[in-house]
Amino acid sequence: MLLLAGLVLNGMAMCAQSRPNILWITIEDTSPRFIGCYGNAAAHTPNIDRMAKEGVRFTSAFSTNTVCSPSRTTLITGVRTYAAGTGHHRSKIRTPDWMYGFPFYMRQAGYYTSNNAKTDYNLAGAKLITQQAWNESSATAGWWNRKPGQPFFAVFNFNDSHQSRTMTDPYDVYRKHVWERLSPGDRIADTAFPMPPIYRNSAAMRKQMARVYNAIALTDNSVGKLLERLQSDHLMDSTIIFFFSDHGEGIPRGKTNGIDLGYRVPFIVWLPPMYKDRSPWQTGTVTDELIDFEDLAPTLISMTGAPVPGYMNGRILMGSQRIPPKKYIGLSSDRSDNGIDMVRSITDGRYLYSRNYMPFMPEARYINYMEISAIKQIMRQDLAAGTLNHIQRLLFEPRPAEFLFDTEQDPWECKNLVTDIRYKAQLDAMRQELDQQVLKTRDVMFLPEYELAAITAAGRDPYTFRLDEKQYPLRRIYAAARLSGKKGRSVVSDQIRLLNDTSRIVRYWAAVGLRAQPPELLKPYRKVLLQALTDPYPPARISIASVVYEAFSSEAALTALEAGIADASDHLSLMTLNYLLYTKHKPAFVPAVQKIANDPVRSENVRWAAKDLLVHMGQATYAAP
């Protein structure tokens, strides 16, 4: 099926409309490295490849986050998660009443807007935003319900490439829902693809990796059927098509991790001849222009002729209002399910710099939804058996404070260039850019999630809260946070001093930073650290308790951590459990963890973290995948 086949040029002039129809096709959890048109000869993606051949393929397109619901916050609002406070997966944070989902503005301009069917916007007011944004949002929604001649914006989300299919579902579920729905000619065998070097090249791992290829092949079939319907409805000549994934790859080390594999997405724009004059790119070309999800809302609103709201800071990518490309873009990764984290990244498309603010946790963090999968269990078994090489073992070790990867020369991000003197200028430039972006955007995610939830519970929103310097002294907070991960006596001395700061958030970050210090550097400060266990701010107190227990096995710290596990606040309990997952001395906590592991009053994340901790302590096992 050729996308351009069937276009009748003479008829185009008669039916041309000044405003294009827009079809937005989203797939899930997919890196461009597993799609044919991006250079993977083993992939079976003919429909996606054809769109790329006839359209514009982007090689430097990025999700603003590495997990689905925070990414969808930016997609629906046009606002970055670290401005809205929505970086944590399914956190239901309040946003300002005047912040609408961007299709609302398209509706106001006369477009028929439909969503089929995923929302998952990660917002406290998601139901209202959905009602305002869409004429219809359902599993049957589409352009076919609009008024005659009405321009449309139609979203379709295909989830067959989701992490559930590629790794988390038991293998027999994958066979039923993916393998058996593919024709023999579409199936990719376990031996038919190159193995990424970050995984062991074993038969067991190949069996799991084949799931990725087959899930994307099935997704491609769904894309093809949708395009066939668009063509059969005689709409190809008047519709601009956007195709992309909601974030990077769902397999271990991709999704949830602040590196290129988690951020970079396949992205294609297809334009019919009627609208080729709106494109700054030639048909059938490849561009390395830097784009991210913040750019999509203002771009689509501008296509309708409506004014773009002032709070949207993304670029308009095409048309008469096009904004020139940026040199760098900022990206972020925060909590996913029960696995807390905080990473901020800068990329220019080739180099990616990431700052890990909680580096004592590895890339292969304990996240229950991943731990129950066969591929993650195989990886941990191989780790225990000593069969992983150096690169593969690194996924399970504490991260450095900084990553710098050349993704052109090192696409699987195996070589960290931070200590390579040849890249010092590149490193310094990206460090400076990151610092500037954090302060300029007033990144509100430097507040603990406990604090963000309290702001929402009080009827306020973090987006507005962050703009008040008195309420949120970001320069002071960031000065403490940027010490986290740096090691040495002078850094420890600064962090110890900050434990007495008047700002509770500064004290929290001082404690988090100390958690990443070698215990031997903390010995001279034992008395000061024990005194800090009385800090009145719970996130600071719990963080210090984890430091003191890891360094000194203190009974007072043990008591404080047990109290943290049992705390009525799920945010504090989850924080405590995550600290303990990466603590050496765990057995003393078994009774406290067992007590909440199956408590139905607790959030799912708390129960998942407790289960992960019990498995890690040898007190439970995961069900066979």
Image: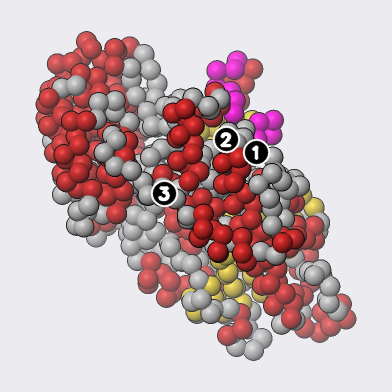
Please identify, in this view, whether the residue under mark 1 or under mark 3 is nearer the observer. Answer: 3
Amino acid type of the residue that numbered disc 1 sits on in the rendered structure: Met
Please tell me how crowded label 1 is: few (under 14), some (14-19), or many (20+) other residues with Cα within 10 Å.
Answer: some
Report, in whole angstroms, how far the alpha carbon at label 1 lies from the one at label 3: 24 Å
The nearer-to-camera label among 3 and 2 is 3
Q: Of residues 132 and 137, which is closer to you in this image?
A: 137
Element on which disc 1 rests: loop
The residue under the point 53% across, 38% down is: 259
Say the numbered circle drawn on residue 114. Answer: none
**Residue 189: x and y, percent?**
68, 50
593 left or right of 387?
left
Q: Which residues are magenta?
A: 408-421
Q: Earlier in the sequence, mark 1 or mark 3?
A: 1
Q: CA distance from mark 1 to mark 2?
A: 7 Å
Residue 47 x %, y %? 73, 63
Residue most toward the right? 10
Q: Which residue is mark 3?
A: 624
Please name the amino acid that badge 3 sits on: Ala
Name the residue that disc number 1 marks: 195
Direction from residue 115 to residue 614 in the image, left or right: left
Q: Quadrant of residue 21?
A: bottom right
